[in-house]
Amino acid sequence: MIGRRRVARRGPGLVRTVARTTVIAGTATAASRAVSGGMDRRAQQQQEEQYADAAAVDSQAQIEEMQAQMAEMQAQQVQNAAAATPAPQAEVSTDLTTQLQQLAQLKESGMLTDDEFQAAKTKLLAT
């Protein structure tokens, strides 16, 4: 019994102390990794946000560039359409008026009959 009392009075013993120290060290290591890992996640999240912001700015710049190109193309189309416009209507009507006057003169001079004059006039107005 004496041997038992000595063990009980000495304290926990070497194996218990080592086991307790190992558990404490493991817990501290796990806690340290969790804290440093959290900081890495925050840094990674900030970096991802910066990339997203940069991509949004780049996309906006590309959109503005495309809009400018579209505006230039539309302006060129308007210029091309204006250049390809047929002769003004005033010139056409003046030419038609001149031709009708010539037909009237031919009728008055007796070179065209009433029926010929009406047929020629109808033909001119149809075109």
Image (cartoon, rainbow, N blue to C red):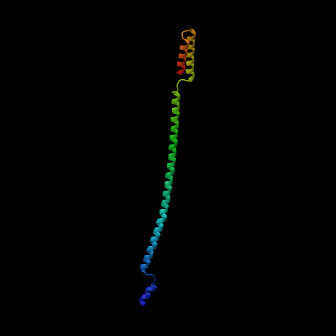
Q: Position of residue 75 (x, y in %)?
A: 53, 33
Total labels: the figure holds 0
Q: In this view, does 37 lie above or below 78?
A: below
Percent from the top left, x then y, of residue 118? 55, 16
Q: In which quarter of the image is residue 111?
A: top right
Residue found farthest to the bottom: 1
Q: Which residue is drawn at 49% across and 58% down?
A: 43
Please state, as top left, top right, bottom left or bottom right, where the N terminus lies in the image: bottom left
Q: In the image as oriented, which residue stretches furthest toward the front?
A: 115
In the foreground, 13 or 34: 34
Q: In which quadrant of the rendered view does residue 89 lie?
A: top right
On the rendered structure, is 93 left or right of 10? right
- Name which residue lies at 44% across and 87% down: 6
Horizontally, residue 22 falls left or right of residue 126, namely left
Give the image location of residue 96, x and y in percent.
Answer: 55, 18
Judge whether 68 appears above or below 9 on screen: above
Instruction: Using the image, determine if residue 69 lies above or below residue 19.
Output: above
Seen from the viewer's position, the closer of residues 63 and 87 is 87
- Identified at 43% across, 85% down, the residue is 7
Q: Nearer the viewer, residue 92 or 114?
A: 114
Residue pictured at 47% horizontal, 67% vertical: 32
**Residue 35 position in % (x across, y down):** 49, 65
Q: Nearer the viewer, residue 35 or 118?
A: 118
The vertical placement of 9 against 29, above or below, is below
